[in-house]
Image: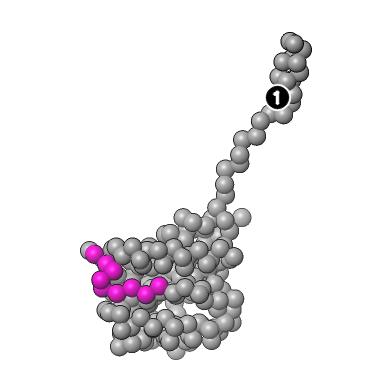
Amino acid sequence: MSRSFIVGLSGNVSSPSKTRSLLDEIVTRASSRFDVQGETYDLNDFGIELGLARQFSDLGEVSRQIVDRIVQARAVVIATPVYKGSYPGLFKHLIDLLDPSWLVGKPVLLAANGGGEKHALVIEHQLRPLFAFMEAQTLATGVYVSERDFANGRLVSGGISDRVDRAIGQFAPFLPQPRQQERQLPNISHLRLHQEAAAASF
């Protein structure tokens, strides 16, 4: 049986980007904490056909395969940049192409990256209602980051790092726990023989 997997989608077209860096960090930590493999994509992976598509069937094979990975994943991480108080239009266009039933019950961790703290409520006011309409199970803790949380394109804020771990922990009811090494138990028959031999010596 194939291993369970978690998929991350970044709603940006720039590469590299802070949003993709945040997404990769979350998915990597989640795949390390649970018994899942991680995959991440961004809008560039869909190519220019995404903007031209009027319905899902207009997407090419590669794009449809990415959507299929999102739909089949045990859990999803969504990270998006914030422009003028909301997510990018092309990201919303992709969501509009999906059948609303495809994400029903899917656990989704929401994250966003903005230029400053004034966009911090974008998760609650924009992303959460969008995925509530899709009947996904958005995790209680969202992750919002701003410019000051990065250095050289990498997440450096300790407070945000803790929040990421707290959010990932809320995947626990949905994702398989890592396999723990079986504790080595003593050989009972050998132990009994040893005890009998010791008793006979008295």
Residue at 47%, 73% in the rendered image = 141
Image location of residue 65, percent across then percent down: 48, 71
Task: Choose top left, top right, bottom left or bottom right for residue 143.
Answer: bottom left
Q: Name the residue at 74% across, 24% down.
A: 192
Percent from the top left, x then y, of residue 161? 37, 63
Q: Principal SS element in the magenta part?
A: strand
191 horizontally vs 88: left or right: right
Residue sitting at the far front = 202
How was the colour assigned to the protein in this rendering?
one colour
Q: Report x, y in % for residue 159.
A: 35, 66
Residue with the mark numbered 1: 191
Q: Is residue 190 visible?
A: yes
> In the visual, does 171 lie left or right of 184?
left
Q: As rendered, which of 163 and 40 lies closer to the eye?
A: 163
Question: Split into 4 quadrants, where in the image is the N terminus?
Answer: bottom right
Is residue 144 or residue 17 the one in the foreground? 144
Above or below, 24 against 126 in this view is: above
Q: Is residue 5 magenta?
A: no
Comparing 201 with 87, the one in front is 201
Q: How crowded is the residue under tag 1: few (<14 C-alpha within 10 Å), some, or many (20+)?
A: few
Of residues 44 and 101, the one nearer the viewer is: 101
Quadrant in the rendering for residue 173: bottom right
Residue lying at 50% horizontally and 82% vertically, measured from the top left: 131
- Would you say residue 150 sits in the magenta stretch? yes
* Amino acid, disc 1: Leu
Residue 126 percent location from the top left of the image: 42, 86
- Going by the image, does 95 lie left or right of 154? right
Q: Secondary structure at mark 1?
A: helix
Magenta stretch in the rendered image: 143-151
